[in-house]
Image: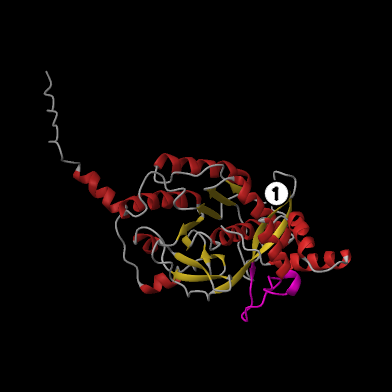
Amino acid sequence: MPHEAPIITLPSGLVDLESRMNKVERNRLRFVCVGEMFKNYKPAPWLIDGFIQENSISLVFGESTAGKSFFVIDWACCIATGKRWSGLDTVAGPVFFLAGEGFGGFCRRLRAWEITNEASISEAPLYFSDRPAALMDAESAKDVIQAVRELTKANGKPALIAIDTLHRNFGGGDENSAADFGQFLNHIDVMRHELGAAVVIVHHSGHSKADRSRGSSSIKAAMDHEFCVTVEADKTRLLSCTKMKDAASPEPQRFALRGVELDLLDAKGRPDSSAVLVRLDDQGGSQDAPGAERGGKALDYVRKAVEVCGNNQKEIVRTSFYALYPSADPEAKRKAFNRGWKTYFDSLVTET
């Protein structure tokens, strides 16, 4: 009877050394010389030239009425349509917006953007979620990836994923906890890796410090770019870069929120309204932007009419204005109201 070789069972915890060494050989660390680094150098492409790089992660923060969401909506619309933003080139591509609020507010802001920019985004590759995502949860992050992939089959690789806001899309964790934020960030990194898109997060400023974002101090450290939106004394909005990794920080830019009367109707059938960002020039003047006091006397009476009627709906304000304005000439009242209303509405600031 032939002799059978004994079956040897390795003790628990030991591994096949040869197999292990082969694996190390396949994945061994390499050092490369500087010349090879120069030869293989690939500059990081910009999604918005000088502002946001492709496949980066950015934070836009500010107080609750600063207008930070308006900036991200403006970026999203420009990227989805290939339109230049604030005179800067963009790379056109699909944009996906994780919305932390209802469609109504976004719908008004998007229509205001269309009217002001004379461009349609109805058929552009710009998509909004119908609910927030709990991105601390791995399964929720997977759901986002899958939903984006289903739409990219027809539209191509996504360019940008906007998360508005961090708090509404965080999930059950604590944004002040470095560990919880680390888990949230890990899932965003998976999304970026799987989808190849840049991510912009909208967040609130600190409770006691408006010059930093709320929550864990590790948030800023994890960002490639960080932007702060502040409301200046004259109600203009200042967009400042507070972190720009591996590139020069862009100069601060000033904007105004210009009121836009819409062709959408409110619940009582009256024209609805929203606002849109308008870039200001270096002297603080507008480039097709709000003028502070051009309505003169008529503007003063429009403001009084708004105070009296407690409403900013145009026709309601008109009735109150006609009752207050010191003229018996109906045509003079009409012209004065139209002049004052235009200035008032152009300077209307809408909260975000």
> Residue at label 1?
123
Is 32 on the left or on the right of 43, as rendered? left
**What is the count of numbered marks?**
1
Residue 175, x across and y down, in percent: 37, 53
Q: Quadrant of the N terminus?
A: top left
Residue 257, x across and y down, in percent: 63, 65
Residue 143, x across and y down, in percent: 48, 40
At label 1, which amino acid type do we have?
Glu
Is 309 on the left or on the right of 250, as rendered? right
Q: Residue at x 47, y 44 (%)?
A: 133
Q: Residue at x 31, y 52 (%)?
A: 179
Along the line of sight, which residue is nearer the eye, 343 or 239? 343
User: Which quadrant of the figure has residue 120?
Assistant: bottom right
Q: Residue at x 49, y 53 (%)?
A: 165
User: Which quadrant of the figure has residue 323?
Assistant: bottom right
Residue 282 sits above or below residue 256 on the image: below
Tell me, yes or no, if residue 126 can be seen here: no
Tell me, yes or no, if residue 205 can be seen here: yes
Along the line of sight, which residue is nearer the eye, 211 or 240? 211
Mark 1: give few (<14), some (14-19) or many (20+) Cα within 10 Å: few
| Farthest residue, direction top | 1
User: Which quadrant of the figure has residue 316?
Assistant: bottom right
Is 121 on the left or on the right of 187, as rendered? right
Residue 128 sits above or below residue 198 on the image: above
Q: Looking at the image, what colour scheme do you see?
A: secondary structure
Chief secondary structure of the magenta span? loop
Q: Quadrant of the C terminus?
A: bottom right
Residue 237, x across and y down, in percent: 56, 69
Question: Within the magenta stretch, is there residue 272?
Answer: no
User: Callout 1: helix, strand or loop?
Assistant: loop
Question: Within the magenta stretch, is there residue 289?
Answer: yes
Magenta-highlighted residues: 278-299
